[in-house]
Image: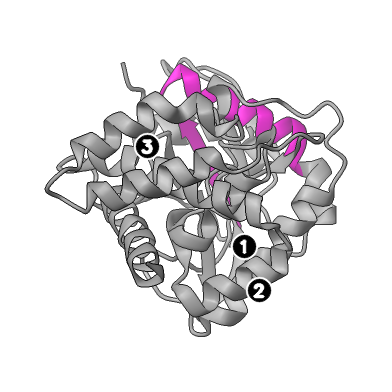
Amino acid sequence: MGFEPSLETARALVDGQFPGWAGLPLVGVPSGGTDHTLYRLGQGLVVRFPRAASAVAQADKEWAWLPKLAPGLPLRIPAPVARGEAAEGYPLRWSVCPWVEGVDETQARFARPGEAAERLGAFVAALQGLDATGGPPPGQHNFGRGVPLAQRDVGARESIEALVGVLDAGVMLEVWEDALAAPVWDRAPVWLHGDLHPGNVVLTEGRLASVIDFGGLGVGDPACDVMAAWTLFEAPARARFRAAVGVDEACWRRGRGWALSFAAGALSYYMGRNPVLAGIARRTLERIVLETTAAS
């Protein structure tokens, strides 16, 4: 069952629990995301209401960790500033976060993709360098982002099979098997955003300004965030992203596998349901297929 509070309910929740914000305008925000209903509050805040009980764990995790991580990162992240409780017939905890001015990359393109790739690569490297002690390991709370790729094998193969006739399944299977064959991550887990794709990066005047939506946050294999090389960038910028992150060949191969499994699963599931996420997934797979065929 989904929970999507109406504007009237959202207004009552904010006014009842945070009377200092009662005079601020509250306006719905269209979003291609699946886990939260968003309302902009005044000029500088956004209220995030989980649509399902499973998404509450994401909000709790962001509340616990983002304020600690934010000072060590080179891009702005929307660390929560307040947390609301169930009331007014809405049954879940909810949060208030800073509003990040701009548009996501599904609505606009980077003015200078190479610069954006370097900035995002520096962000990923900084995040991976922060102390991960006590960080949440991969699990249901973050869609399993950061697990060893072998744990995604069955699902990835099923998704590739579902895309026969849509894209080159043979090439996708080749890429997947190459990723599985890469040496595994055998060092301490590192911090991961877990969901780096065009819907979760914000541009201001064409320049990368912020990374948002940390529902996939956790600690695990750093290759997971390397998937951004294919979810966001074409070949020239992709190389600059790789250099900025500073990953070895094994991590790069696993990162391509992460991008493939994410995108194949998303495209096979969201075709006909969510055109924004389906479009992100298709472009990611097209980049992987083009890169692989060009190299052969």
Q: Residue at x 69, y 34 (%)?
A: 220
Disc on res. 118: 2
User: Mark 2 belongs to which amino acid?
Assistant: Glu
Which is more foreground, mark 1 or mark 2?
2
Examine the rendered structure and indicate whether residue 59 appears above or below residue 44: above
Disc on res. 78: none
Examine the rendered structure and indicate whether residue 255 appears above or below residue 61: below
Task: Indicate the colouring scheme.
Answer: one colour
**Near-viewer residue (214 or 173):** 173
Q: Which residue is mark 1?
A: 210
Which residues, given as a range, are shown in magenta?
44-66
User: Mark 3 belongs to which amino acid?
Assistant: Thr
Mark 1 element type: strand
Could you say which quadrant of the image residue 161 lies in? top left
**Near-viewer residue (40 or 16):** 40
- Callout 1 crowding tier (Cα within 10 Å): few <14, some 14–19, many ≥20: many
Mark 2 element type: helix
N-terminal-most mark, 3 or 2: 3
Q: Say whether marks 3 and 1 touch (CB < 8 Å).
A: no
Residue 281 lies left or right of residue 211; in this view the side is left
Residue 178 lies left or right of residue 280; in this view the side is right
Gap between marks 3 and 1 measured at Cα: 20 Å
Q: Is residue 60 magenta?
A: yes
- Callout 2 crowding tier (Cα within 10 Å): few <14, some 14–19, many ≥20: many
Q: Which residue is mark 3?
A: 34
User: Mark 1 belongs to which amino acid?
Assistant: Ser
